[in-house]
Image: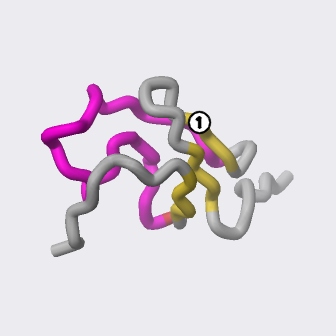
């Protein structure tokens, strides 16, 4: 089980295993959480939570699209 942390990190790096991306993350404590919101990160490689302002960065950058 992942260690729970307070929702105070403002910059979090995520991997493809964390998709679909949502905030708060499962490792964040519930007592200071906001409603869960899903954020598209695959195309740009970055997402900003509209509730808490946390910036998420996709490790490896945006997904490459093929033809």
Left or right relative to 34: residue 39: right
Q: Is residue 28 within the magenta segment?
A: yes
Q: Main secondary structure of the magenta part?
A: loop
Q: Is residue 53 magenta?
A: no
- Relative to the observer, which residue lies in front, 65 or 21? 21
Mark 1 sits on what residue? 48
Most extreme residue toward the right is: 67
Residue 50, compared with residue 56, is above or below; it is above
Q: Is residue 56 above or below residue 18?
A: above
Element type at mark 1: strand
Rendered view: 57 above or below 52 = below
The x, y position of residue 52, in whole percent, is 44, 32
Structural crowding at the residue carrying mark 1, measured as other residues with C-alpha within 10 Å and reported as few (<14), some (14–19) or many (≥20): some
**Which image quadrant: the N terminus?**
bottom left
Which stretch did the figure color magenta?
17-42
Rendered residue at 58%/45% (across/down)? 55
In the foreground, 25 or 18: 25
Residue occupying the point 63% across, 55% down: 57
**Horizontal and vertical percent position of residue 20:** 44, 47
């Amino acid at each position: 089980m992942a260690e729970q942390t307070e929702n105070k990190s403002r910059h979090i790096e995520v991997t493809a295993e964390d998709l679909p991306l949502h905030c708060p993350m499962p490792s964040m404590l519930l007592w200071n959480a906001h409603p869960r919101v899903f954020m598209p990160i695959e195309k740009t490689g970055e997402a900003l939570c509209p509730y808490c302002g946390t910036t998420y960065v996709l490790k490896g950058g945006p997904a490459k699209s093929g033809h």
